Structure formats: structure tokens, C-alpha cells
Image (tube, rainbow, N blue to C red):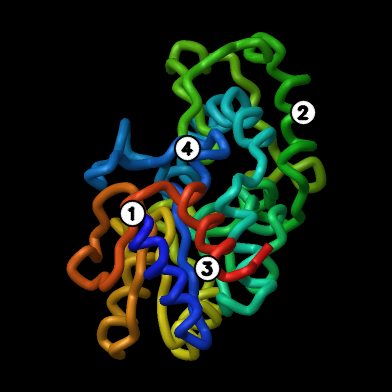
Amino acid sequence: MNEQIDQLAEFLDRHRNVLVLTGAGMSTASGIPGYRDEEGVRRGKPPVQGPEFRGSDALRRRYWARSMVGWPTLARAEPNAGHRALARLESAGHIGQLITQNVDGLHQRAGSARMIELHGNIHTVRCLACERRQHRAALQQRLLRDNPALGGVLAQPLPDGDAQLEPEALHEFIVPDCEHCSGVLQPDVVFFGDNIPAERTRQALQWMDEADALLVVGSSLMVFSGFRFCKIAAAEGKPIAAVNAGKTRADDLIGLKVALPAQEVLPAVAGLLGAT
């Protein structure tokens, strides 16, 4: 694997403007569970769909109850060595921009600057009626105040601040609404079944057009919003490298793949390139 790490360092050194695309595997070392196993197969039940969330009181009750219990795992997560290495590589000029499929905010906290959160940021909550926004951490205090019986519940953490909470625990749960207009609250993320905002998509595709190479880190690429960047790069003859411990949807398009965790590979690559 040392040879592949050397090759990845050469890949970043050789190309002028590398676009980086990251996924859930980037944050598992920070204690945030991933969606898929090493074969790219989704674990557990299907995620919440946006139209269903907005159309069902029962589903919103289930979502916010599980989020209340699972939020502390995500809230205390810290950037890992992989996040910090990408920030150093950007600062040293070895990568141009970063697009993340993650909603955990860890890239910003690590110091990445030129980046797009493709699916939004779960640390912000917005009202679907008046569009006011608030910090998710502040909403957690309301949830705890209004639902003290769940305050000490322990449950298996799931991706993106979810938790494995049984339905019978939800009957008396009080769903938070907007304190300004009583509207429906939703985390400021792109749920499955929803579209990425047009301007965000336009900027991401422009970065892909301007890049001369693509590096995928910690993503199985099973969701099309990420896989499309590999399809575009391949169609335009731009080389693709990947750091991912498991299978990806684009394995036949990737020229260089390092099948190790990002938190092990990226600091080594940064060290070889003097990005300290």
C-alpha cells in the first residue's frame, strides 16, 4: 500500500486543479456511522424521504424523536486526521475545491475553505413556512425541555444524528415547530427524494468542468448525486483517483484506488507533499 500512497501523492502533485468529492466514509473515524457496508449495500431501513417528512405528522414525530436521541453523537464529533489533511492539502495548493456529500460540517471545522456541502448542513434547522433558520444545538434544548422522558434514553447511533428508537417510545413526543410562525421545521439538508438546490448544483458542476482531475474520498458513489461527477470526469477524459476502503459504483472508471481508510491515507499523502 505504500506504493499506492506514493502514487496518490504523485497524482495530486501532477495535476494543477484537483476536485475532491467526499462521502460518509470520511467521517466514520469521527464516530459518525456510515450508511453502507464495504460492498456498498445500505444498512438498516431506508432513510426518510423528503415528501413523506413534509406530508406526515407521524413521520415528523418519529424523525425528531430519533434525532433528539441521536444528536449528541453527531454534536460531539470532531474532525479526524483525514479532514485535517485535506484542509492542509488545500492550503498548500494541492487540491482546488472540495464537494462533500456529508452534512456534518466537519470539513469546515477542519479548515477547508473552498467547498460545497452538496446535501446541506444538519447543524441548521429552517422553517418551511417563514424560512427562518436556527442552530440545531438550540433546538436540542427545546426538545429536551418538552420531552424529558427521552432525555436519558440510550439508543444505537445511526448516520447523520439518527438513532435506533422503537416506535412505542414516540406516542407522547412533542414535535417542535417554528417559534415565530408555528410552521414545520426541517433540518437544512437535502432529504432523499428531494432535489439539490439549482445554484448549488450549478457551482459544483462548474468546479467539475474547471478541474483537471477528480479525487473521491470515503464514498461508495451509490447515490447518483456523487456518481455523476465520476461519469462527467470519465466522459471528459479526466483522471480519477479514489481513497475508499470498500467497493464503489465507479470502480470501472477509477484509475488509481487506495483501499484504505482516509484517516490513514491522507495524512501520509500530505506529509509526502510537505503539506504540514
Q: In this view, does 86 lie to the left or right of 22?
A: right
Q: Nearer the viewer, residue 171 or 88?
A: 88
Q: Could you tell which of marks 3 and 2 lies nearer the N-terminus?
A: 3
Element at badge 1? loop
Residue 142 is labelled as 2
Q: Could you tell which of marks 1 and 3 lies nearer the N-terminus?
A: 1
Please determine whether, in this image, residue 237 is positioned above or below residue 31. below
Q: Nearer the viewer, mark 2 or mark 4?
A: 4
Please determine whether, in this image, residue 99 is positioned above or below residue 267. below
Kindly check if marks 2 and 1 are in contact, taking CB atoms under 8 A apart as contact: no
Please determine whether, in this image, residue 55 is positioned above or below residue 5. above
> What residue is at 52 percent from the left and 53 percent from the top?
102
> What residue is at 42 percent from the left and 40 percent from the top?
34
Q: Where is residue 3 in the image (x, y as percent from the top left)?
A: 34, 62
Q: How far apart are marks 2 and 1 (CA)?
A: 49 Å
Question: What residue did someone put label 4 on?
Answer: 159
Q: Could you tell which of marks 2 and 1 lies nearer the N-terminus?
A: 1
Question: What residue did someone put label 3 on?
Answer: 99
